[in-house]
Image: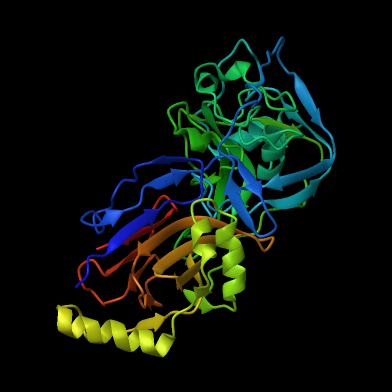
Amino acid sequence: MPTRRWLIVLAALAATSQGACSEDDSPEATAPTASAGPLASSSSVLVADESEDGVAPQKKGRATEAGQRIDIPAGTVVAGSTPGDDGRHPSFEPPNLEFSLGGYSIDLLPYPNDPNQKPQTKVDRAEAEKLCGERSGRLCTDLEWERACKGPDGDRFAGGKRWDPDCAKAPERCASGFGLLAMGGALREWTSSTVPRIKGVVKKDAPVIKGAGADAADVEHRCARRDVVGAETKSSDLGFRCCYGDRPAASIPAPEWGPTMKRVDFPPAKLTELVRADPKLARLAEEEIKYFNEGAAKATILRRAKTRGGTSELPDNAEVTTAPVIWNPAPGEEILLVTGLSGKDSFVLAYHRLPDGRHRLGAAMVMENELGPVALVYDKYRRRKLQWSSCLDCYGDTGNVTYREENRVVITQR
């Protein structure tokens, strides 16, 4: 057999770091996971803008007396994050959905909203709501909290496009674009919002918290981050702040499960447009992109396996496809998976599907001087992992497409 050269292409994101292997994929060759950076857009794809030159420094502020409030004008908030963002939880964070909110007021600092006192912690949600009520206020909704955090410019972190570690050390000095202090810096905060039950994710309706503790990873301090805890939870890093005015009716909807795999009409010309827009994949567009014949591909990967010591019969419930498919590994996540041929090179590509019809590269593997065919082999009852293969279960000619616990897509070779 001729020697094949395998080229692993990373996701089209700004900064990369070696991803940790989970127990079931540690022996495999794997592409590093990537951390999201600023994005530039074309008509059909989001690609990384690796330059952060000129990014404004973290905004600063200071509370001068107890009881200060900030008036937030009526307006819109683009809630959530972009599919594929580092740290994003797709079942909790909506894909950049826009909501209209009326005007409201919000405490400058976490309760008791006094620069001379430490934030009140170790209270459950009912107690937090009661304490706000005693001041003629209420717990903020998650949308109100997120609008106050993102500010008028839609900042990723309160008062900045990048995380400033000093905001965990002195959160009372870090200000959002609206002037709120200590949002997401060193404290999780109760909200009055709830995530409804999501099968396999949230067992029952659960309260939403925003923000992060001082020791949390940088991505957990994002304004969009949304997590859930039990209503009776009491913790030294869990506080709250109060809002004033009518509670808005707007709320973030819970995502639903879709089919594990769904075939879609995605012509080669449209895929060519996507790969041409990404510098790491653009060379694939220099040749005509073709999809493999499904029937012939299935027969070939099984025939090769029979002669090379692989698996010559498909496992129970396994299906084989070479057609473009939408993969739903988690509620709120849709990933376009494609295999194909460009000149003499085969490829497997995974794109996050965005709600505006665009796509964002999540992971890619290009196999140089490999004519394929390459097929996707999946079990519709197994959500988070499937195989790609040119010879079923043959060493070097097969691998996995995995949706890892950190909500990242990784393509590996066995």
Residue 228: give x, y in percent of width and height: 52, 47
How many numbered badges does the structure rendering display? 0
With 258 as the anchor, is 391 left or right in this view?
left
Instruction: Look at the picture and state if 219 lies above or below 134.
Output: below
Instruction: Please name the residue shown 19% across and 73% down the image.
Output: 1
With 281 as the anchor, is 18 left or right in this view?
left
**In which quadrant of the rendered image does the C terminus lie?**
bottom left
Residue 226: give x, y in percent of width and height: 56, 45
Instruction: Please name the residue shown 53% across and 50% down the image.
Output: 279
Instruction: Please name the residue shown 53% across and 37% down the image.
Output: 124
Instruction: Look at the picture and state if 332 lies above or below 298.
Output: above
Q: Is residue 84 visible?
A: yes
Instruction: Look at the picture and state if 51 lies above or below 270.
Output: above
With 24 as the anchor, is 184 left or right in this view?
right
Residue 76: give x, y in percent of width and height: 79, 45
Q: Residue 6 appears in which quarter of the rendering?
A: bottom left
Comparing 403 with 7, the one in front is 7
Q: Can residue 404 be seen in this view?
A: no
With 84 as the anchor, is 94 left or right in this view?
right
Residue 103: give x, y in percent of width and height: 84, 38
